[in-house]
Amino acid sequence: MERVFSSEVRPGKNVTVKGWVDNVRLLKNIVFVTVRDREGFLQITVKKDDVPVSVFETASNLSREDCIQVKGNAVHSKIAKLGIEIIPEDIVVVSKAEKPLPIEFKGNVETGKDTRFDYRYIDVRNPQVTKIFMIRHKIIGLIHEYFRKNGFVEIHTPVIQAAGAEGGATLFEVKYYHKKAFLRQSPQFYKQMMMASGLDRVYEIGQAFRAEKFHTRRHISEFLSLDFEIAWIESEEDVMRVLERMVVYVLKGLNAQTDLNLKVPTLPLKRVTYDEALKILKGLDIDVKWGEDFGDPEEAKLGELLSKKGHDWYFITKYPSKIRPFYIMQDGEVSRGVDLDYKGLELASGGQREHRHDVLMNVMKQKGLDPKNFVFYLNAFRWGMPPHGGIGFGVERLVKQILDLPDVQETILFPRTPERLVP
């Protein structure tokens, strides 16, 4: 008989369920076994007089986290929390769990984060942790839906690259045969190059790497980045419209598929210029000099105030050119770069790109970059590049903020940090 998940079990059916023992209550002539799978819990009720002796003995010797298979009849129950219990015909212990368990997630015992990550495969059995990755799974699915419904082509660009999109200071260097190469910070160069190809609207969801020795709530050495690029734009507003509509699509989709009941913002999202953000922070006695970027504390305070005014989601626009990457179009001292923040955390950064070859070359030199190191990228601008723009979006940051988690590491199965390389 084919296995069913706990959420699929209905009274009156003979079913086979598989999972881990969450709890065992052993009374004189009855054993209550709670089985857990990724969808939830099921109660197995084993009465001594109603089941074969071997089944009762097997149930009596079960312990937490044993891996088992149960075949039996699902019936209505006034006692079981879900209103359903299974009367077993057979219980098979597929694998016993060694004791003691290396981590705990039941009762009042709290295991530290580092130990949890050492045994992540057990940690994910915790329903609260399972939920994180099921939500992440749904978010990624909804992002794919949105872009495909809106005429975007999914692309896949190299993870091993000849140069970094934002300079060499934060790159992971790798030996590539007899050459020096780097793990990508971003697919930035390649998605821009595709704007010269005629594909016009592209997106990619893939791994990216940053070599900063960070210790913050939002940074990680390896993360999942959503990137999109669109051609024939008139300004960065075209980019923001694509992104804010994606946000609404994802939030509505999550509300339809889960019990999160997220607040969906009305469009357009709030636009706050860099200069306006400085004034807001100054009013909170936080002094940021013009031309400096916002750090975690400034972002958090700005987000707190805007949330009070009803703006959990907002764009910060018109950043100074000197703190934006060379590929962002400049209007003198002010750029066409934008960030998207959600509850005080930056989720996305991008804007309109510079598509004019000569201007791009000059800006690179002004920022201390040698165009000779970027010939493979610059060549794409020599034979007809349309105006274009795009965004890099941190998927895990979105999961973190939606679920109000303390750290982006919680949203990644096997996080990579300056201190952690295994498992």
Image (spheres, rainbow, N blue to C red):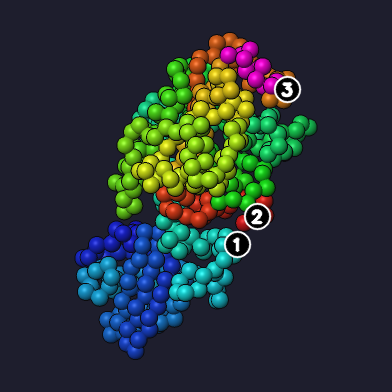
**Residue 259 position within the rendered picture, expressed as x and y whole percent measured from the top left:** 31, 53
> Residue beneath label 3, please?
370
- Location of residue 158 (image quadrant): top right
* Closer-to-camera residue (223/408): 408
Q: CA distance from mark 2 to mark 3?
A: 34 Å
Amino acid under label 1?
Asp
Residue at image location 22% in from the left, 65% down from the top: 11
Q: Is residue 413 visible?
A: no
- Between circles 3 and 1, the one closer to the viewer is 3
Tell whether position 283 is magenta.
no
> Residue beneath label 2, please?
420
Q: Which mark is residue 114?
A: 1
Q: CA distance from mark 1 to mark 2?
A: 9 Å
Q: Secondary structure at mark 2?
A: loop
In the rendered image, the quadrant that contains the C terminus is bottom right
Does 85 sit above or below residue 233?
below
Decide: few, some or many residues near mark 1? Use Cα within 10 Å; few <14, some 14-19, many ≥20. few
| Number of numbered labels in the structure image | 3
